[in-house]
Image (tube, grey):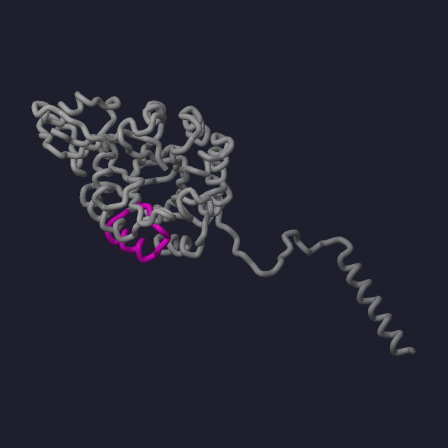
Amino acid sequence: MWDLLGKKFKSRFLLGTSGYPSPEILKKSVLDSEVEIVTMSLRRSGAMSEGTAFWEILKELPVHFLPNTAGCHSVKEAVTTAHMAREVFNTNWIKLEIIGDDYNLQPDPFALVEGTKILLEEGFEVFPYMTDDLVLAEKLVDLGVRILMPWASPIGSGKGLINEYALKTLRNRFPDLNLIIDAGIGKPSEAARAMEMGYDGVLLNTAVSQALTPCLMAKAFSETIKGGRKGFEAGLMEERDFATPSTPVVGTPFWHQEKNNEKHSSCEKKNDLFTS
Amino acid sequence: MKITINGKEKSIEEKFNTLSNILSLFGKDGDYFAVAINNNFIPKHQYENQKIKEGDVIEIVTPHPGG
């Protein structure tokens, strides 16, 4: 079981709810993958025709909601959105997203620190969506966050883990903190890789919602995330630059005979040279 | 007076000058919604007493899909 902020979860897979072909497919994706935490946003009432239908289905599912501040570009917007989310979803969890660049949707690290400080003081559990910058992570941890959510790569890019070195550095530097990869994962194998590196969870959306068969892809991610975690817990072998036979050499049939024959044959050639 | 609700300008009579009245007039989607006025969150328990004035910008939000 995964202990996240005092709650126990069987699944380490967190799923976004945006961009699915229909509310029914989203529901099936959530149920088939057995995710227990889903992310939601707040938007203007009536802004999207499907919004109400999605919520009517989602609110009945056995999941914990992680509201986000997606689309916010300033600390003030994000803090106000967090306040509204706390009331609507009845949770003090907030995935704090403050976008700093519209091209790659890179989070603004300076605004993130400022917003995190305000929300922590107000009793929120902040899930900061961040780049993989070590110094930023240290600032956030110093403020008191209990979770870090570094990106693997830009939102919706599907580029996977573009800087494994930085992600490993974060893992090594904060061994006891919950680290959740958020954004950029495109394939189940990439999620497994993150889990093998010791990450505590993976949050993704587009890779599932835009798959040809979202329900099947959700299940694929669920299984690989489990597998990656088990691999990490089991302890991965060290990578080597040389080959080592996995089958024992001792007792290999014919091996000595062939070797002796080669030696014998080469001795004969040498002897031939001497005699000629 | 003129106010803005979810990006659209609306004209309302002065007598409907509380947030409760505004929500009754313009409706909302079920019980799951939250309100901000001029980018400040207004908790539900303040709706009755929250006065609305000329030029106020009101945002009414509901749960939507998100990643």
Q: Is residue A185 above or below residue A34?
A: below
Q: The N terminus of chain B is located in which quarter?
A: top left
Question: Does residue A230 appear anywhere in the picture?
Answer: no
* Of the pair A229 and B52, the residue shown nearer to us: B52
* For residue A13, side relative to residue B55 (left or right): right
Q: Is residue B33 above or below residue A100?
A: above
Measuring from the top left, give residue A64's x and y in whole percent: 33, 32
Q: The C terminus of chain B is located in which quarter?
A: top left
Q: Which residues are magenta?
A: A128-145
**Residue A244 part of the magenta-drawn span:** no
The residue that appears at 13% across and 25% down in the rendered structure is: B12
Measuring from the top left, give residue B19's x and y in whole percent: 13, 27
Measuring from the top left, give residue A169's x and y in whole percent: 39, 56
* Of the pair A233 and A206, the residue shown nearer to us: A206
Q: Residue furthest right?
A: A276
Q: Name which quarter of the figure residue A85 lies in.
A: top left
* For residue A226, side relative to residue A112 (left or right): right
The residue that appears at 76% across and 59% down in the rendered structure is: A256
Say how many tags the image has: 0
